[in-house]
Image (cartoon, grey):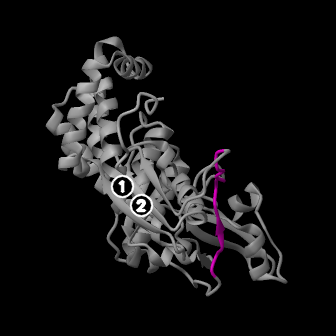
Amino acid sequence: MTIENCLSLTDVLSFLNEKNVNYKVCQFSPSYNEEDIDQEVSRLGMGLLEAVPLNVQGKKLILAVIPASLSLDFAEFSKLLAPRAIRMPAPDEIRARLPFIQPENTIPPLCGLFGLESFLSPLVEKLQTVGFFAGSRHTLITLDASDFRLTLCNPSPIRVPTRLKYRAYASPGRTPNDACILGVSLESADFHTSKLITITDWICNHYSQCVVMLGDGLYRITLQLDSDVSENEALEHSKWLARDFVHSQLLVFIFRESRCRFDFKFSSEIQSTDCYSRYYSQLWSLFWNNKQFQHSCRAFADQKCLAATYWKSWRSSVVWLTTLHARLSIPGPCRFWMR
């Protein structure tokens, strides 16, 4: 860590102490790569904040505080501040105003620390816990949202508009329907907050109801394949991951005004039903007695893992089919589902 980063972190912590707020500091070791850090901070959901520096005519530098999972809607924000022009400051301008922050590092969203006027996204007011990087991506500070508001300096009543970071498109030939299922892969980067916001936004624009299927009972098999843990340990950890996902990402599903209703279902609960048990037995019978279905399961396993772990993969295939049937009441097994 450079001297500049140390000074930045020291100033941040001193400022928080002066405000008498409770906070936690998480220091990621150098062995953490960007993917590891993204996985850890995804538990903050929309609570991970970032400060976007802007030059406003007549005000000089300001900080726009928004969820890091969204982007500043520059065009809409410009309209709100008209006729004053706004622009992104050059690195030299940031260095002149914030001398102990290097332009390549993140700026903590602590406007009071720098004596800058703050502009907040309205989503910040809906948060319970917030976090931000201080100095570098390897230092994360978290605190209650109520304590964070004590750190603001001259907050403006003008709210910062935001936009999605990604765009979603429908597959060709999609059949219109009122309801859909969103299957969530636990600990997958495809369901980190910024992408999840885009997915749910698209769903809200096309459906009135969505069942969010969390595969905790299925993910236990992945955990067993990746680590030497018992089936029960893997299942309990998967259950915790699924419920932690709902808790950390709940705001993503409810923050927008929409007629779409999201219902959360856990595969571990579905797997405890009589419907699941009956269909699971039928699939096992089909697997042992139907060579085509058995080949389909083994082909799926062949794509997913090594020969030594085949039995766990085709078992996962059967479990997944049974869970879908129990939830959707799909009549009869079909070897083409696997594809």
Q: From the viewer's perspective, is residue 309 above or below residue 157?
A: above
- The percent coordinates of residue 237 (x first, y second) are 23, 44
Q: Amino acid at mark 2?
A: Gln
* Element marked by disc 2: helix
Amino acid type of disc 1? Phe
Residue lying furthest bottom in this view? Answer: 157
| Residue 332 rendering spot, x and y as whole percentages | 35, 38
Up the image or down, 282 lies above or below 17; here it is above
Residue 126 among magenta residues: no
Q: Nearer the viewer, residue 275 or 154?
A: 275
Is residue 118 at least partly visible in the picture?
yes
Q: Secondary structure at mark 1?
A: helix
- Residue 163 within the magenta-colored segment of the rendering: yes
Kindly indicate whether the residue at mark 1 contacts the one at mark 2 (C-beta within 8 angstroms). yes
Identify residue for label 2. Answer: 249
Q: Which residues are magenta?
A: 159-171
Task: Locate residue 63, reporting x and y percent.
Answer: 63, 71
Circle 1 crowding by C-alpha within 10 Å: few under 14, some 14–19, many from 20: many
Give the residue pinned by disc 1. Answer: 245
